[in-house]
Amino acid sequence: MTFTHRHLLGIEHLRPEEIVTLLDRAEDYVDLNRAAEKHGDALAGLTQINMFFENSTRTQASFELAGKRLGADVMNMAMQASSITKGETLIDTAMTLNAMHPDLLVVRHPHSGAVDLLAQKVNCAVLNAGDGRHEHPTQALLDALTIRRAKGRLHRLSIAICGDIAHSRVARSNIILLGKMENRIRLIGPPTLMPSGISEFGVEVFDDMARGLEDVDVVMMLRLQRERMDGGFIPSEREYYHRFGLDADKLAHAKPDAIVMHPGPMNRGVEIDGTLADDINRSVIQDQVEMGVAVRMAAMDLLARNLRDVRGAA
Ligand code: NCD
């Protein structure tokens, strides 16, 4: 067994062989999810609680379905209606839930580091579903699975990540994962949306789409994360689209078989042309959603095995 973690908090903690183990397990679940009967029992008898302190459509639905398909009892906490709004701290809420003996806690939080902090206080497995601009490990893993299936490999590819890098936990987790798997990573975006110190990550940085996309295998677009911006990072959406929005003309600089990705939710006509996003010959955006369920099943399956091993040994 090459996956021995108690929690899934970030890609930063995973070794390349652990990433491969998780993706291989997810492949089995892709098949299960395409079958008429979608029931596994890897999480039978276990309780999964989803705590989303930020809005989410696909990630929350994906974790919920993943848990249900593997037989867990799944509860979604409505955090807007929770005691957090009455002043209770994150840790108090977590301790309260912990006393109800959950086995898997799936947490999304607007503050970087909040999920790690919570994981130190509870005795179940914690999965990070996105913390601030820090990490979003299951997104990077589902992106990796999508790339591996489309390109037949997950190494020695040239991959462009484009747009609002500075505010994106998706970009951060992907840069770490794709770097560990020995790919060439290019970041393309306006200098105002590049994080400081980015050169330490071993990436090439461009502020011009035509040059940055030259001969890449994968084009990963990002949403403009206005909720994390506190000022004028871009001149106007129109100007942004003109320079950085992906359309067929800009994509023509990439390899002829380059794939187009976006984690969603997407702003059509801001980051990406709507027709291109829907073009099933180029866009793998729907595959990303499909792979998301399988990857989350695999992640919870592996963590549950470790949980049972630890409890069995105690
Ligand atoms: C991403 C997120 O929440 O970080 N969305 C997602 O999980 N599918 C990206 C985004 O919100 O732009």
Image (cartoon, rainbow, N blue to C red):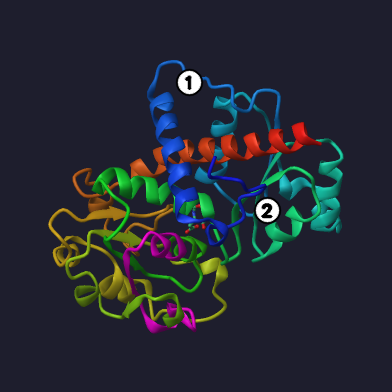
Q: Tell me which corner region of the image, top left, top right, bottom left or bottom right, holds residue 65.
A: top right
- At 44% from the left and 37% from the top, the residue drawn is 26
Of helix, strand and loop, which one carries label 1? loop
Quarter of the figure with the N terminus: top right
- Residue at image point 56% right, 70% down: 228
Residue 44 in percent (x, y) is at: 65, 23
Give yes or no for residue 176 being in the magenta stretch: yes
Q: Amino acid at mark 1?
A: Lys
| Whole-percent x, y for residue 288 in the image | 38, 45
Q: Confirm or reject: label 2 Cβ below 8 Å from ligand 1.
A: no
Left or right for 86, reference 191: right
Instruction: Tell which tag, 2 or 1, sits nearer the viewer.
Output: 1
Residue 60 part of the magenta segment: no
Residue 209 against residue 272 in the figure, above or below: below
Image coordinates for residue 296, horizontal then vertical, percent: 52, 40
**Residue at x 26% of width, y 60% of height:** 157
The answer to whether marks 2 and 1 mark residues whose Cβ atoms lie closer than 8 Å is no
Magenta region: 175-198
Callout 2 amino acid:
Phe
Please name the residue that numbered disc 1 is placed on: 38
Q: CA distance from mark 2 to mark 1?
A: 29 Å
Q: Can residue 233 be seen from the camera position used here? A: no
Furthest toward the top, the residue is 37
Q: Which residue is mark 2?
A: 53
Residue 284 visible in the current orientation: yes
Q: Residues within 10 Å of mark 1 (few under 14, many from 20)?
A: few
The disc, 2 or 1, on the residue closer to the chain's N-terminal end is 1
Q: Report the quarter where the C terminus lies.
A: top right
Q: Position of residue 177 (x, y in %)?
A: 44, 59
Q: Which mark is residue 293?
A: none
